[in-house]
Amino acid sequence: MPRSRHTGPGGAGEPLAVDGAEPPWSRNDALVTAGACAINVLSYAFFDDPGAQYDVSVAGFLLVAAAALPLLARRRHPVAALAAVLVLDATAALTVPLPSHFGAVLVVALYAVARACPGLVTAVAAVATASVTVLSQSNGRIPPWHVAVGPPVSSLIVVGTALVINRWQREVAANRRLLADRAVADERRRIARELHDIVAHHITTMQLMAGGARANIADPEVVRDALVTLEASGRLALREMRQLLDVLRAGEEPETAPALPQPGVDDLDRLVAESRLGGLPTEFGVHGARRPLPPTVGLTVFRIAQEALTNARKYAGSARVSVQLTYRQDGVTVEVRDDGGGAPPQEGVPAAGPGGYGLIGMRERVALHGGTLAAGPQAGGGFAVVADLPLTTDEVDEAAVRCEGASR
């Protein structure tokens, strides 16, 4: 004969299952039923009404306890459970003398109907509960006012409470969905920024290298250098895009290789070299004592410089660009300035000004770190992008520890 077993480790709300069969009720249902039964039995045993005399009997105890049994099915069949409770409760009231009451069992049964059923069913259930309770407790006679008023008022209170909780739970669920949608939207914007930075920078560099190779086809050395840079830029763009796509596919398939490190301030030299090879004279300077930065801050510095150099190649025309990185005690500043006149963007292409997608991405990146970004035309001509990123002492110390651990 098969043995009964629990389906889980033993939480209060876990169902009682027998050999994998779906259980008719859960432990929570049993606890609620036992609690409501106990309250009704105690009220029957210790109720004291000076104007009436009730004899406590074994039959009364059994009938009051039996009226609670349908609560075990209240989650699956709330209307049937309420009907069974009303029948048993009316039978108990008509069989043995009981005090006038609206017991805990009726409260739980009507509450379950109000929580699970539509408005019309709930209204009919509330009216039926109040009517049956009044008629059964008055034994067919004209009930006194407290018997006639008590059950309807109690039914209204129970139904009203259930409706308020239903509305509150709907609002909580809606807020959770909004938060989830907002998290998804934020992640999409972050991915869009990454794709924009990768594609815009590397494709622009590749385009310039290809144009330079074509213009200098008679000089093999120049062509060779341009093609090598084009190949390296294409390979790096492909690698970064694959890394970003691996993030999107996380959880779908096991990782076969460790993720490549994100670029940071140490990659600014390579970025400036690519800009020079692309035909844009670019200076690079570092001020202050170099020190490790948190990876997210280093990535933000790199992406800002990358986007600013891309915009300068697109719109600055014949210009010189200066990239300056300044380490301060409480932060780091990256400046990208050009002295070009700036060419108007083509129709349909986002402008490189404050309304462009690139600068919007810069502002969002800087805002994530609590920093400030200033971007716009300079008084003497050209365009400037200045990003100031604050750093706390804990962030600096943590970055130093991480760098020291990686070098070992």
Image (cartoon, rainbow, N blue to C red):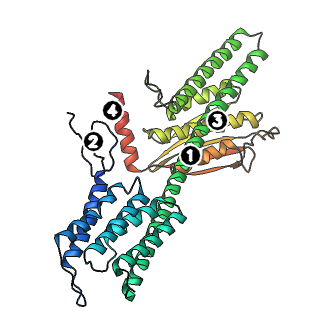
Mark nearer the N terminus (2 vs 3): 2
Give the Cα separation between the discs numbered 4 and 3: 33 Å
Mark nearer the N terminus (1 vs 2): 2
Q: Amino acid at mark 4?
A: Gly
* Residue beneath the point at 78% across and 40% down: 342
Closest to the camera, between mark 4 and mark 3, is 3
Q: Is residue 105 left or right of residue 180?
A: left
Mark nearer the N terminus (1 vs 4): 1
Q: Amino acid at mark 3?
A: His
Quarter holding residue 294:
top left
What is the quadrant of the N terminus in the image? top left
* Residue behind mark 4: 405
Pick whichever, 176 or 127, lies toward us. 127
* Residue behind mark 3: 196
Give the Cα separation between the discs numbered 2 and 4: 43 Å
Q: Are marks 2 and 3 in contact (CB under 8 Å)?
A: no
* Residue behind mark 2: 8
Q: Are marks 4 and 3 in contact (CB under 8 Å)?
A: no
Any part of residue 157 in sight: no
Give the Cα separation between the discs numbered 1 and 3: 15 Å
* Residue beneath the point at 49% across and 55% down: 173
Q: Position of residue 186 (x, y in %)?
A: 56, 46
Q: Amino acid at mark 2?
A: Gly
Q: Position of residue 349 (x, y in %)?
A: 77, 38
Q: Amino acid at mark 1?
A: Asp
Q: Which mark is residue 186?
A: 1
Closest to the camera, between mark 2 and mark 3, is 2
Give the Cα separation between the discs numbered 1 and 4: 32 Å
Determine whether 185 is above or below 30 in the image.
above
Q: Are marks 2 and 4 in contact (CB under 8 Å)?
A: no
Numbered disc 2: secondary structure? loop
Q: Residues within 10 Å of mark 4 (few under 14, many from 20)?
A: few
